[in-house]
Amino acid sequence: EAGVAQSPRYKIIEKRQSVAFWCNPISGHATLYWYQQILGQGPKLLIQFQNNGVVDDSQLPKDRFSAERLKGVDSTLKIQPAKLEDSAVYLCASTLAGQGEGYGYTFGSGTRLTVV
Amino acid sequence: SQQGEEDPQALSIQEGENATMNCSYKTSINNLQWYRQNSGRGLVHLILIRSNEREKHSGRLRVTLDTSKKSSSLLITASRAADTASYFCATGRNNLFFGTGTRLTVIP
């Protein structure tokens, strides 16, 4: 089966600019996550979708970050305006059902964002 | 926080040796998962152990879980250079929360 697709692979922007990341999960996976991974740290959850509804966005900096999952399939994560501290790898993951159901996550390769 | 914390932060071994990584967490769990991340790549799911399981095997991997101590360990036997990566434990009730990982280096 095809994996989780993410694009772009790399992105360099200046601070205060906007940027968008795209994710296509594994077909049939109802749950989609966006994680932020700063160099040397573990992934930090930003937002969880179940189909096209938001389940948890408590750790999403909503003043600058937004995400949507139209039609319960693809998802986009946007940052506007970007700050230097947003430099990180943004990982998308999907799973058949929620974490409570006991399914492993499938991660994409991530988008490495550098804000200069 | 529900996140797991791995120990040690870094581990360097010779090829063929066994590598053991530990994970501690703070709250009750449904399951605990281990992931591997090669440099610059996404995370790969290795193994999931449920709260009612004590030990699980997958190839050269052995995971144990002690819910009374809120801890888990990942053992990689007969390590290979290709096992060089960061290893993360992750747990949580509705979402997965990750620790900071153990950086494993296997020297050929």
Image (cartoon, rainbow, N blue to C red):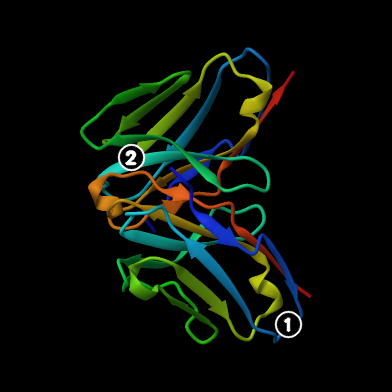
- Quadrant of the rendered image containing residue A25: bottom left
The location of residue B73, given as percent across then percent down, is 43, 30
The location of residue B15, given as percent across then percent down, is 67, 16
Quarter of the image with the C terminus of chain A is bottom right
Please give the name of the residue rendered at 48% of the width and 48% of the height, measured from the top-left corner.
A3
Q: Is residue B56 above or below residue A21?
A: above
Quarter of the image with the N terminus of chain A is top left
The amino acid at mark 2 is Lys
The amino acid at mark 1 is Lys
**Is A71 or A11 nearer to us in this picture?**
A71
Mark 2: few, some, or many residues within 10 Å (few <14, many ≥20)? some
Mark 1: few, some, or many residues within 10 Å (few <14, many ≥20)? some
Do the residues at pointers 1 and 2 share their chain? no
Which mark is on residue A15? 1
SS state under label 2: loop
**Is B62 or B72 nearer to us in this picture?**
B62
Residue B13 placement, left or right of A2: right
Q: CA distance from mark 1 to mark 2?
A: 42 Å
Q: Is residue B17 above or below residue A71?
A: above
Residue placed under numbered mark 2 in the picture = B70
Residue A28 placement, left or right of A115: left
Please give the name of the residue rendered at 50% of the width and 63% of the height, measured from the top-left corner.
A23
Residue B69 placement, left or right of A26: left
